[in-house]
Amino acid sequence: MKVRILVSLKDIVLDPQGQTVKNALHTLGYDFVKDVRQGKVFELELEGISRDEAEKAIVEISDKVLTNPIIEKFDWQILEKK
Amino acid sequence: MKFGVVIFPGSNCDYDTLYILKEVLKQKTVILWHKEHNLKNVDCVILPGGFSYGDYLRSGAIAKFSPLMQEVKEFALKGGFVLGICNGFQVLLELGLLPGAMLRNKNLKFLCQFVRIRVENEKSPFSQKTRKGQVLKIPIAHFDGNYFAPPETLQELKKNNQVVFRYCDSDGQLSEEANVNGSVESIAGLLNKEGNIMGMMPHPERASELLLGSEDGRDIFESVIDYFES
Protein backbone atom coordinates (compact mmCIF):
# COMPACT_ATOMS: atom_id res chain seq x y z
CA MET A 1 0.00 0.00 0.00
CA LYS A 2 1.07 3.56 -0.63
CA VAL A 3 1.14 6.04 2.21
CA ARG A 4 1.47 9.80 1.94
CA ILE A 5 2.74 11.74 4.94
CA LEU A 6 2.67 15.53 5.04
CA VAL A 7 5.09 17.26 7.38
CA SER A 8 4.73 20.93 8.17
CA LEU A 9 6.07 23.42 10.68
CA LYS A 10 3.95 23.97 13.79
CA ASP A 11 2.05 27.24 13.85
CA ILE A 12 4.24 28.71 16.60
CA VAL A 13 7.30 28.42 14.38
CA LEU A 14 8.32 31.17 11.97
CA ASP A 15 8.54 30.00 8.35
CA PRO A 16 10.82 32.34 6.38
CA GLN A 17 10.80 30.03 3.37
CA GLY A 18 7.01 30.23 3.22
CA GLN A 19 7.22 34.00 3.55
CA THR A 20 9.70 34.19 0.68
CA VAL A 21 7.37 32.18 -1.54
CA LYS A 22 4.45 34.41 -0.55
CA ASN A 23 6.42 37.53 -1.45
CA ALA A 24 7.37 36.04 -4.80
CA LEU A 25 3.71 35.26 -5.52
CA HIS A 26 2.76 38.85 -4.66
CA THR A 27 5.43 40.09 -7.04
CA LEU A 28 3.74 38.01 -9.74
CA GLY A 29 0.38 39.61 -8.97
CA TYR A 30 -1.27 36.90 -6.83
CA ASP A 31 -2.25 39.39 -4.13
CA PHE A 32 -5.02 37.17 -2.79
CA VAL A 33 -2.43 34.76 -1.32
CA LYS A 34 -2.51 35.70 2.35
CA ASP A 35 -0.08 33.16 3.71
CA VAL A 36 2.20 30.34 2.61
CA ARG A 37 3.65 27.58 4.77
CA GLN A 38 6.21 25.25 3.26
CA GLY A 39 6.44 21.59 4.24
CA LYS A 40 7.56 18.17 3.10
CA VAL A 41 5.84 15.18 1.52
CA PHE A 42 6.97 11.59 2.11
CA GLU A 43 5.53 8.75 0.08
CA LEU A 44 6.09 5.30 1.54
CA GLU A 45 5.45 2.01 -0.21
CA LEU A 46 4.54 -0.64 2.39
CA GLU A 47 4.35 -4.39 1.85
CA GLY A 48 3.48 -7.40 3.95
CA ILE A 49 1.72 -5.49 6.71
CA SER A 50 -1.95 -5.24 7.66
CA ARG A 51 -3.79 -1.95 7.51
CA ASP A 52 -4.02 -1.75 11.29
CA GLU A 53 -0.32 -2.46 11.72
CA ALA A 54 0.41 0.10 9.02
CA GLU A 55 -1.53 2.85 10.75
CA LYS A 56 0.40 2.23 13.96
CA ALA A 57 3.74 2.11 12.15
CA ILE A 58 3.06 5.29 10.20
CA VAL A 59 2.50 7.25 13.38
CA GLU A 60 5.65 5.80 14.97
CA ILE A 61 7.78 6.46 11.90
CA SER A 62 6.46 10.00 11.57
CA ASP A 63 7.02 10.73 15.23
CA LYS A 64 10.49 9.18 15.57
CA VAL A 65 12.08 9.88 12.23
CA LEU A 66 10.19 11.98 9.72
CA THR A 67 9.44 14.88 12.03
CA ASN A 68 11.09 16.78 14.82
CA PRO A 69 8.04 16.95 17.12
CA ILE A 70 9.30 20.16 18.74
CA ILE A 71 8.86 22.13 15.54
CA GLU A 72 6.88 19.94 13.13
CA LYS A 73 3.49 18.26 12.89
CA PHE A 74 2.28 15.62 10.45
CA ASP A 75 -0.77 14.34 8.65
CA TRP A 76 -1.03 11.07 6.82
CA GLN A 77 -3.28 9.11 4.50
CA ILE A 78 -3.24 5.67 2.95
CA LEU A 79 -3.71 6.14 -0.77
CA GLU A 80 -6.41 3.86 -2.16
CA LYS A 81 -5.69 2.06 -5.40
CA LYS A 82 -7.70 3.36 -8.30
CA MET B 1 42.20 14.17 30.27
CA LYS B 2 41.26 12.14 27.24
CA PHE B 3 39.11 13.55 24.46
CA GLY B 4 37.24 11.66 21.76
CA VAL B 5 36.10 13.27 18.52
CA VAL B 6 33.20 11.46 16.88
CA ILE B 7 33.21 11.19 13.09
CA PHE B 8 30.04 10.65 11.08
CA PRO B 9 29.93 10.33 7.31
CA GLY B 10 29.85 13.99 6.32
CA SER B 11 31.55 15.42 9.43
CA ASN B 12 34.21 17.85 8.25
CA CYS B 13 35.45 19.69 11.34
CA ASP B 14 36.73 16.54 13.01
CA TYR B 15 40.37 16.99 12.06
CA ASP B 16 40.39 20.69 12.93
CA THR B 17 39.08 19.77 16.37
CA LEU B 18 41.57 16.92 16.70
CA TYR B 19 44.41 19.26 15.71
CA ILE B 20 43.58 21.89 18.32
CA LEU B 21 43.19 19.34 21.12
CA LYS B 22 46.23 17.25 20.22
CA GLU B 23 48.76 19.68 18.74
CA VAL B 24 47.85 23.00 20.33
CA LEU B 25 46.46 21.98 23.72
CA LYS B 26 48.58 18.82 23.98
CA GLN B 27 45.70 16.62 25.15
CA LYS B 28 45.33 12.89 24.58
CA THR B 29 42.75 12.72 21.80
CA VAL B 30 41.27 9.82 19.83
CA ILE B 31 38.90 9.43 16.92
CA LEU B 32 35.57 7.72 17.56
CA TRP B 33 33.99 6.25 14.42
CA HIS B 34 30.20 6.49 14.52
CA LYS B 35 29.66 2.82 13.67
CA GLU B 36 31.68 1.38 16.55
CA HIS B 37 30.20 0.78 19.98
CA ASN B 38 33.35 2.00 21.70
CA LEU B 39 34.00 5.27 23.52
CA LYS B 40 37.61 4.24 24.27
CA ASN B 41 37.42 5.46 27.88
CA VAL B 42 37.41 9.13 26.98
CA ASP B 43 36.56 11.80 29.55
CA CYS B 44 34.99 14.15 27.05
CA VAL B 45 33.15 13.38 23.82
CA ILE B 46 33.12 16.00 21.11
CA LEU B 47 30.54 15.94 18.33
CA PRO B 48 32.21 18.09 15.67
CA GLY B 49 30.85 20.36 12.97
CA GLY B 50 30.07 19.35 9.42
CA PHE B 51 27.22 17.92 7.39
CA SER B 52 26.64 14.47 8.85
CA TYR B 53 24.56 12.45 6.41
CA GLY B 54 24.48 15.50 4.17
CA ASP B 55 22.00 17.19 6.52
CA TYR B 56 19.44 14.95 4.80
CA LEU B 57 15.92 15.03 6.32
CA ARG B 58 17.07 17.55 8.99
CA SER B 59 20.54 18.45 10.25
CA GLY B 60 21.63 15.79 12.72
CA ALA B 61 18.39 13.82 12.28
CA ILE B 62 20.01 10.69 10.90
CA ALA B 63 23.27 10.91 12.85
CA LYS B 64 21.28 10.44 16.04
CA PHE B 65 20.59 6.85 14.96
CA SER B 66 24.28 6.01 14.51
CA PRO B 67 25.39 2.99 16.61
CA LEU B 68 27.85 4.96 18.76
CA MET B 69 25.12 7.39 19.85
CA GLN B 70 23.79 4.70 22.24
CA GLU B 71 27.06 4.83 24.15
CA VAL B 72 27.26 8.63 23.88
CA LYS B 73 23.76 8.96 25.33
CA GLU B 74 24.55 6.61 28.25
CA PHE B 75 27.85 8.39 28.86
CA ALA B 76 26.12 11.78 28.86
CA LEU B 77 23.27 10.66 31.13
CA LYS B 78 25.85 9.34 33.61
CA GLY B 79 27.50 12.78 33.74
CA GLY B 80 30.26 12.44 31.15
CA PHE B 81 31.33 15.68 29.42
CA VAL B 82 29.92 16.14 25.93
CA LEU B 83 30.53 19.15 23.68
CA GLY B 84 28.50 19.51 20.48
CA ILE B 85 29.85 22.05 17.99
CA CYS B 86 27.56 23.26 15.20
CA ASN B 87 26.34 20.01 13.55
CA GLY B 88 27.28 18.37 16.87
CA PHE B 89 24.90 20.76 18.64
CA GLN B 90 22.21 19.81 16.11
CA VAL B 91 22.77 16.11 16.86
CA LEU B 92 22.46 16.74 20.62
CA LEU B 93 19.17 18.56 20.04
CA GLU B 94 17.84 15.76 17.82
CA LEU B 95 18.89 13.23 20.48
CA GLY B 96 16.99 15.18 23.11
CA LEU B 97 20.14 15.53 25.23
CA LEU B 98 19.65 19.28 24.92
CA PRO B 99 16.24 20.99 24.74
CA GLY B 100 14.92 22.82 21.71
CA ALA B 101 15.48 22.58 17.97
CA MET B 102 17.25 24.30 15.09
CA LEU B 103 15.46 26.08 12.28
CA ARG B 104 16.72 27.53 9.01
CA ASN B 105 18.53 30.85 9.49
CA LYS B 106 15.99 33.67 9.55
CA ASN B 107 17.44 35.42 6.49
CA LEU B 108 17.64 32.14 4.58
CA LYS B 109 21.36 32.58 3.93
CA PHE B 110 24.25 30.31 4.80
CA LEU B 111 26.21 32.43 7.26
CA CYS B 112 29.97 32.10 7.17
CA GLN B 113 31.53 34.88 9.24
CA PHE B 114 33.05 35.88 12.55
CA VAL B 115 30.49 36.70 15.24
CA ARG B 116 30.74 37.88 18.80
CA ILE B 117 29.20 35.85 21.61
CA ARG B 118 28.75 36.97 25.18
CA VAL B 119 29.30 34.70 28.16
CA GLU B 120 26.05 34.41 30.12
CA ASN B 121 27.08 31.57 32.41
CA GLU B 122 30.70 31.63 33.50
CA LYS B 123 30.30 28.77 35.95
CA SER B 124 29.83 25.83 33.56
CA PRO B 125 32.68 23.34 33.02
CA PHE B 126 33.01 24.68 29.48
CA SER B 127 33.14 28.37 30.37
CA GLN B 128 34.64 28.53 33.85
CA LYS B 129 37.83 30.19 32.60
CA THR B 130 35.83 33.11 31.21
CA ARG B 131 34.20 36.10 32.92
CA LYS B 132 30.49 36.82 32.87
CA GLY B 133 29.84 39.29 30.09
CA GLN B 134 33.11 38.49 28.32
CA VAL B 135 32.88 38.85 24.56
CA LEU B 136 34.41 36.09 22.44
CA LYS B 137 35.19 36.41 18.73
CA ILE B 138 34.45 33.06 17.10
CA PRO B 139 33.33 32.15 13.55
CA ILE B 140 30.07 30.54 12.51
CA ALA B 141 29.34 28.59 9.35
CA HIS B 142 25.78 27.36 9.17
CA PHE B 143 22.47 27.41 7.36
CA ASP B 144 20.32 26.00 10.15
CA GLY B 145 21.50 27.77 13.30
CA ASN B 146 18.29 29.53 14.26
CA TYR B 147 17.72 28.11 17.74
CA PHE B 148 14.11 27.60 18.75
CA ALA B 149 12.54 26.59 22.04
CA PRO B 150 8.89 26.88 23.05
CA PRO B 151 8.11 29.42 25.84
CA GLU B 152 7.93 26.81 28.65
CA THR B 153 11.36 25.46 27.67
CA LEU B 154 12.83 28.97 27.53
CA GLN B 155 11.58 29.64 31.04
CA GLU B 156 13.25 26.45 32.28
CA LEU B 157 16.50 27.35 30.52
CA LYS B 158 16.62 30.73 32.18
CA LYS B 159 15.57 29.40 35.59
CA ASN B 160 18.39 26.83 35.56
CA ASN B 161 21.04 29.13 34.04
CA GLN B 162 21.40 26.87 31.04
CA VAL B 163 22.12 29.62 28.50
CA VAL B 164 25.91 29.85 28.14
CA PHE B 165 26.40 32.16 25.16
CA ARG B 166 24.33 34.79 23.34
CA TYR B 167 25.13 36.49 20.04
CA CYS B 168 26.13 40.11 20.66
CA ASP B 169 27.95 43.02 19.05
CA SER B 170 31.59 43.87 19.77
CA ASP B 171 30.49 45.92 22.79
CA GLY B 172 28.70 42.93 24.24
CA GLN B 173 25.24 44.34 23.52
CA LEU B 174 22.39 42.18 22.29
CA SER B 175 20.56 43.37 19.19
CA GLU B 176 18.54 42.05 16.28
CA GLU B 177 21.44 42.86 14.00
CA ALA B 178 23.96 40.97 16.12
CA ASN B 179 21.62 37.97 16.29
CA VAL B 180 22.50 37.03 12.74
CA ASN B 181 20.54 33.80 12.43
CA GLY B 182 17.41 34.87 14.34
CA SER B 183 17.83 32.52 17.33
CA VAL B 184 15.29 32.98 20.10
CA GLU B 185 16.76 35.37 22.70
CA SER B 186 20.02 35.39 20.71
CA ILE B 187 20.98 32.03 22.17
CA ALA B 188 24.25 30.74 20.68
CA GLY B 189 25.11 28.00 23.17
CA LEU B 190 23.41 26.17 25.98
CA LEU B 191 23.80 23.47 28.62
CA ASN B 192 21.68 20.65 29.83
CA LYS B 193 20.24 21.05 33.33
CA GLU B 194 23.04 19.04 34.95
CA GLY B 195 25.73 21.10 33.20
CA ASN B 196 27.83 18.31 31.69
CA ILE B 197 26.60 18.69 28.12
CA MET B 198 27.03 21.85 26.05
CA GLY B 199 26.04 22.69 22.51
CA MET B 200 27.19 25.78 20.63
CA MET B 201 26.77 26.87 17.02
CA PRO B 202 30.06 28.86 16.67
CA HIS B 203 33.28 26.94 16.05
CA PRO B 204 35.79 27.32 18.92
CA GLU B 205 38.21 24.99 17.10
CA ARG B 206 38.46 27.65 14.37
CA ALA B 207 39.40 30.32 16.90
CA SER B 208 42.09 28.62 18.95
CA GLU B 209 45.18 29.99 17.22
CA LEU B 210 45.84 33.70 16.58
CA LEU B 211 46.93 32.79 13.09
CA LEU B 212 43.26 32.18 12.21
CA GLY B 213 42.10 35.53 13.55
CA SER B 214 41.14 34.77 17.14
CA GLU B 215 42.23 32.67 20.08
CA ASP B 216 39.01 33.14 22.04
CA GLY B 217 37.82 29.61 21.34
CA ARG B 218 40.67 28.19 23.41
CA ASP B 219 38.94 29.37 26.60
CA ILE B 220 36.21 26.82 26.04
CA PHE B 221 38.55 23.86 25.69
CA GLU B 222 40.84 25.09 28.46
CA SER B 223 37.85 25.53 30.75
CA VAL B 224 36.83 21.89 30.54
CA ILE B 225 40.45 20.67 30.77
CA ASP B 226 40.98 22.79 33.87
CA TYR B 227 37.64 21.73 35.38
CA PHE B 228 38.40 18.07 34.85
CA GLU B 229 41.91 18.30 36.29
CA SER B 230 40.88 20.08 39.46
Image (cartoon, rainbow, N blue to C red):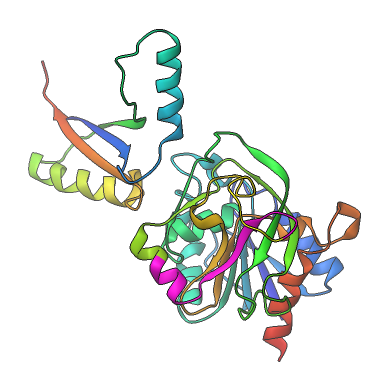
Query: Is B141 a magenta residue?
Result: no
For residue A79, above or below residue B119: above
| Residue B42 seen in the figure | no
Residue at the spot 35% in from the left edge and 32% down from the top edge: A39
Residue at image position (48%, 80%) is B194
Image spot of residue B179 (x, y percent): 60, 49
- Position of B134 with respect to B199 (left or right) is right
Q: Which residues are magenta?
A: B155-171
Residue positioned 40% across, 29% down in the render: A18
- Quadrant of res B31: bottom right
Q: Tell me the quarter of the image containing the N terminus of chain B.
A: bottom right
Q: Quadrant of residue B221?
A: bottom right
Q: Position of residue B203 (x, y in %)?
A: 70, 56
Residue drawn at x 33%, y 46% as measured from the top left: A12
Location of residue B110 in the rendering, given as x and y in whole percent from the top left corner: 62, 37
Which image quadrant: the C terminus of chain B?
bottom right
